[in-house]
Image (tube, rainbow, N blue to C red):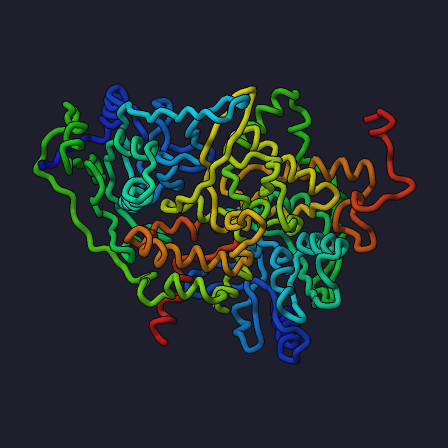
Amino acid sequence: MPWKKLAKSDLPAFLAELSTRAELIVPQEKSGKVRFLPFDAAQPVNFPSSLVDVSLKSVFFPKRRPVATFDPADRTKLEPAAPETSPRILLGAHPCDVAAVNYVDRVFIHSSFKDPLYEAERNRTTIIGMACSEMKPECHCTDRDLSPDDERGMDAVFYETSDAYLFRALNDKGAAILKSSLLKETSEEPQKKDWPGGKYPVDPSSLPSADDSLLSPPSSLFQDIADLCLTCGACTFACPTCTCFLISDEQHEGRGERVTAWDSCQFSGYSRMTGGHNPRKTRAARVRNRMLDKFVYTVEKYGATSCVGCGRCAIICPVGRHFPKEIAELSAKAKGR
Amino acid sequence: MKELRARAGEALANGAIDVLLCWRTEPETGRVKPHVFRKGDDLEQMVFDDRCVHNLVTFLPEVAGHNKKTGAVLKGCDGRALVTLLAEKRLKRDNLYLVTVACDGVKVDGRTAAKCADCVTNVSPVADVVIGEKKTMKPAEYKQLEYIEEMKPEERWQFFAQQFERCARCYSCRQVCPMCYCETCIAEQVGPAWIDPSTKLSANTMWQLSRAYHLAGRCADCGECERACPERIPLRLLNAAMQKAVKDLFHVVPGTDPDVQPPLSVLAQDDPDSLLEGKR
């Protein structure tokens, strides 16, 4: 499909137009961080050159999500929450975040347990992705089968130039959104770049299999990392592909609500079972679980590794743990044996 | 730094300690982060400067749990946390070798950490080796609370509601806190679930207030909860409010005196009864 040009000076008008056609989600700053939020015309919109501080995850899978309501007096009847169907446009999602959403689809749509609320959020959203123009210090998507200008999973894409944005539709859904008098057809094309890689490469086949891990206690490698890991949930909540949640029945002012809430394999309560047994009682066991999950367990369960190389775990860690470096070292060591 | 390396190297070399918890500059990333040094490790990577913001006492129970004798390098605030942990018998003093280095303040996001303006001990109150000079600091005044105290109750609630709303319940505050070591946290109890696990405002508020209460008379003001919070919720304010009340009632500043027990874990004849007498 042809390239279309939007002058930077026309961006506010284009955003205003989109917001009349559908609910519009864009990266905007709130409480010191750039996040994907419902478009607020009073706030400036600046598309970051790469990596939005907070991932796209909560747009499709909020940290707290009511899935049903019930009458606390008669808990036998559940009223499932109605899926949202009104159209929505997501503008400015970077390739790693879109790749992450595609992975999460495997968990919530293409697995044995389909999540209708998540699927509805996906179906009602058109993703206009944005190619990154740089890689930030912790970015390593090129080591995860991606690149800063990867267009997979997007309905349309745009590139930033010095004075304009160059848009191109990638399917009919995207083309429909790009029908605007503000976008002019152009022969101009974005310049492709060579992106560096090799910072934190991982060979999943070098890592221990799930069966090995189930049958053996964590090795000293994991213990050394666990000594200095808090096992808090900061990395899992920042991670765009961590999808674990718990279900809670909550009551407030006579109303009952069944909700899903983000949970983390790093919490000791996560793996505690009825009766009190906890198969991952030690920090080392929980650290091993998260590290191997991204490259081994999710391959076995959902057919794909689940690290997209955004580096948010390494940015958010309160004690400076560098997960991408650690797993790359683990892989290199295992291959050297 | 030279003296720290020499003393630590000696203790590791002659077997006085098995491991040493200190900060290290990670060569590949340039990050300064906590590290467990062992005999034979390159001590040139040891570092102590204003980037050493982490409270190493948080890691001490885990590391000391599988080593016979553990060394640790402490700032003043880390030391205050350790004083309380020792009083609560969480660690055995005999198994620790403690080096404290006079601290001039640490930086968070390139700026001197807010906690440093309110610091009450520039070296650890408990130590085997003191490197640098112990200074007399100004007493705890909790001035950071003034702007909160000036607010009307409804303004105050609005302020904290805006903060707590952002809480994702990642429990970084709990996990980074040396004082939070309950086997099963109140937030993880399920029968009954005292605190709903989802992130609605009422549950987030319940969580943060519960934690603040559990820190009354114990919080060393190391500021780690506030620094670790991915949403930068100003948690030091809650802790300061508790400690101010404790200071008014019991005349204790947590962690500053190894001979004083945490006031809420002991019963004394002269404990104030103002609450029962209806004065507060």
In the rendered image, residue B212, in percent from the top left (x then y), is placed at 66, 38
Residue lying farthest to the right in this orientation: B269
Q: Residue at x 71, y 52 (%)?
A: B80
Q: Which of B173 and A267 is in front in this view?
A: A267
Residue A190 falls left or right of residue A127: left
Q: Which of A126 and A159 is in front in this view?
A: A126
In the rendered image, residue A183, in percent from the top left (x then y), is placed at 15, 28
Q: Which residue is drawn at 64% across and 48% down?
A: B180
Residue lying farthest to the front in this orientation: A76
In the rendered image, residue A212, in percent from the top left (x then y), is placed at 41, 66
Q: In this view, does A215 lie above or below A336?
A: above
Q: Is residue A1 above or below residue A233?
A: above
Q: Residue at x 66, y 73 (%)?
A: B17
Residue A60 falls left or right of residue B20: left
Q: Nearer the viewer, residue A222 or A166?
A: A222
Q: In which quarter of the image is residue B75?
A: bottom right
Q: Which of A331 and A261 is in front in this view?
A: A261
Q: Residue at x 52, y 61 (%)?
A: A284
In the rendered image, residue A160, in percent from the top left (x then y), is placed at 23, 39
Evaluate whether residue A112 shows in this view.
Answer: yes
Residue B16 falls left or right of residue A250: right
Where, quadrant-wise, is the C terminus of chain A in this rendering? bottom left
